[in-house]
Amino acid sequence: MAKNLYEILGVPKTATDDEIKRAYRKLMATYHPDKFASASEKEKKDAEVKSKEINRAYEVLSDKQKRANYDQFGSEDGPQGFGGAGDGGGFGGFEDILSSFFGGSFGGKKTPNAPRQGEDIHVKVNLTFEEAYTGASKVLKLNREEVCSTCGGSGAKDANSVKTCQYCRGSGVVQKTQQSIFGQQVVQTVCTACGGRGKVIEEKCSTCRGAGFTRKESSVKVNVPAGVDNGVTMTVRNEGHCGRNGGARGNLVMAVGVTSSPKFKRVGNDLYYDLSIGFYDAACGAEIIIDTMKGETKCKIPESTQSGTKIRLKGYGMKVLQKEMYGDLYVIVKVETPKGLSSKQMKLLKDFENSLSEGQYPQTKKSAKKPGRFGK
């Protein structure tokens, strides 16, 4: 048995239009998909089904003609509707088949008067590497649609300029009789005179010219959290274009771009830093002051460090998005070979190398040896 539409919205049959609208908005806020982001699949599915029921109930009860038909006949289509008694009817898919033949509307699945959410606004937000690390506040200039302040979104000059459509008599739909392979059929279609709204505007608002909205430049402050990465998309709710017929605003969708750092390479939440050191520090070990995103810190170079050695500094990497955690910094040691040696320096190096045993050059030992090396 089909559910009672008034019971779905939780309002009495005597409820006013405003009471129905308030009940609808309250229920849709309760069953909004964002509220079930971390819920189980069953809970998400149940919420989706409930949202469809709420939308369906509001679609009928917010339309005066459909509500009158529903109250009298149990169907929004009235006594000639194909759905039979009760909400939802029994022909189901047959209505869709007839609609595909005649382009008609059986069941009034959509109404131009129903609240519609505004369009989203898509923008690109560029951050420096440092801003991505610390987070940043940005003021964005948006050219967005706002409800017309002159007419309040009605599109009419005044209340007297809005008239009931004489063709559909305010129902938003008209019925036509057509011949088909099934015989003579009554087809319900959207009224072309009023576009399904049931009302026509005789004199339009001079500000918005009947659109119900105007474009204005707005400043929106957004907070980009620390740890955001290049290419991440972020959504700011209800900062897009205005809705229609009392619908909610659209969203502001930001694509984040982060400039590269001349010092650090980012891989996930870890950072990599190339550190060039001399032969002496690599052989004997050293403590070297290096720059990190947290400021200067000491990096200990162990004795006998080879070029390419990776030294981990825990917690000195990138901030983890939406967590009080940091990745790690990996210092990649690059042993630099000196250039422009004098003959004296070359002799000293040669004497030094000749003084080394094979055990002190374990990797070089495996390579082809030159005459005179290691005493041979």
Image (cartoon, rainbow, N blue to C red):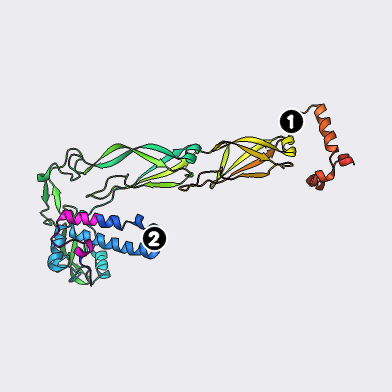
N-terminal-most mark, 2 or 1? 2
User: What amino acid type is highlighted by mark number 2?
Assistant: Ala
User: What amino acid type is highlighted by mark number 1?
Assistant: Lys
User: Which is more toward the observer, 220 or 187?
Assistant: 220
- Judging by the rendered image, the residue that carries numbered circle 2 is 39
Crowd tier of the residue under label 1, counting other residues whose Cα lies within 10 Å: few below 14, some 14–19, many 20 or above: few
Q: Measuring from the top left, give residue 265's x and y in whole percent.
A: 57, 41
- Whether 105 is drawn above or below 312: the answer is below
Q: In this view, does 130 lie to the left or right of 274?
A: left
- Whether 270 is drawn above or below 107: the answer is above
- Judging by the rendered image, the residue that carries numbered circle 1 is 339
Residue range highlighted in magenta: 5-25
Write down the quadrant of residue 214 in the picture: top left
Q: In which quarter of the image is the C terminus?
A: top right
Residue found 26% across the figure and 63% down from its top: 53
Q: Measuring from the top left, give residue 304's x and y in whole percent.
A: 74, 42
